[in-house]
Amino acid sequence: MRFINLKRSRSTALLSAAVVAASGIVATMGVSNAAVTLGPDRPADGLPAYIVDDQGLAVAPCDTDTGICGGAFDPTDPAYWDAGGAAGPIKLVYSVSSPAGGRIARFTGSALTPGRYTIKDPWGTVTCQAPGGKMDCRLPGRRITTLLRSTPTPRAGFAGSPNSNRTFTGSPTGFNRVLITGPGGFQASTNRLAITGLLKANTAMSSVNKMALTLGNGRKTTAVTRTIRYASFGTANAVPTVRKGGTNPGAFSVRDNCASQAPGSACSITVKFVPRQNAGVKRAVLTIDDNSMAAARTVTLKGLGTR
């Protein structure tokens, strides 16, 4: 695979038919040099057979199943992933499409109070203007490096459905919603989007709760346990492995309750710390690797023992 620092002559001008219909807008794609990874070219048209986001979610061109990809897809110029919806009166479209994984974010609205609007979404915070009360804010090349997926996914093998707005997950910041604030106390939000994305066939994909864990408080002596959730959502079984490292790995006991996880299943990894056996501050790192296309995930452990 190669990274997305390419230039191609092809242009794109299609979003998912369902997303466009839902949002009432049309946008053209912009090309970005962010680190989304490309698979090998398809012999028929020279376009990537799939793209992989920075967490190992792999999507293929969604141009074969009109029931869930939308009937307007052009097989020679496919979209790989779309998300669309609305936060109050402001319509939202995010898309990753060819060539070379070009991506865009676009926000539109009318009859708004003129001024500046702040939009916090799964990838960060941006600002858009609404001169004369009309917003048409296009952000080609937005760093959409982590793709979202519906929870639950309405159909196996897909990241979502263009026909239903559903709650989603996948934000690299942990903020799985869109919050918009603006002049005169304006505030609107949503945690539901219509998402299109065909998952790469026969490919393990997984998600891991990577939040750092602090066990104990330095006063109580009773053992403390925390769990890390591991979820499989791809098109093949995910098989994780867990190992300890860092400064004080022996201060933490780890029970790996995961084996081969079928798509749609989840398991837990339990971490235990006994304060009375570990005086002071103990630190370790838990590394969770698997057979997916994602890099190994790490969770930082901190134990506060009694003196």
Image: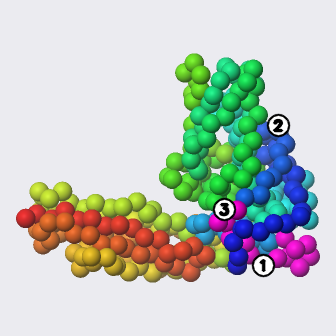
Whole-angstrom CA distance, mark 3 to mark 2, is: 28 Å
The amino acid on which the numbered mark 1 sits, given as a three-letter code, is: Pro
Label annotation for residue 40: 1
In this figure, which residue is indicated by the disc labeled 2?
A: 24
The amino acid on which the numbered mark 3 sits, given as a three-letter code, is: Ala
Q: Which residue sits furthest left?
A: 307
* Residue 284 percent location from the top left of the image: 30, 72
Which residue occupies 51% across, 53% down?
A: 173
Indicate yes or no whether the magenta region holds residue 36. yes
Which residue occupies 52% across, 79% down?
A: 290
Which residue occupies 72% across, 58% down?
A: 32
In this figure, which residue is indicated by the disc labeled 3?
A: 34
Callout 2: SS: loop
- Point out the frontmost of discs 1 and 3: 3
Whole-angstrom CA distance, mark 1 to mark 3, is: 18 Å
Whole-angstrom CA distance, mark 1 to mark 2, is: 34 Å
Q: Specify start and end residues of the magenta stretch as a single range.
A: 33-47
Say whether residue 250 is left or right of residue 30. Answer: left
Please tell me how crowded label 1 is: few (under 14), some (14-19), or many (20+) other residues with Cα within 10 Å. few
* Residue 146 percent location from the top left of the image: 61, 59
Q: Could you tell me which quadrant the C terminus lies in?
A: bottom left
Indicate yes or no whether the magenta region holds residue 61. no
Callout 1: SS: loop
From the viewer's perspective, is residue 192 above or below residue 78? above
Callout 3: SS: loop
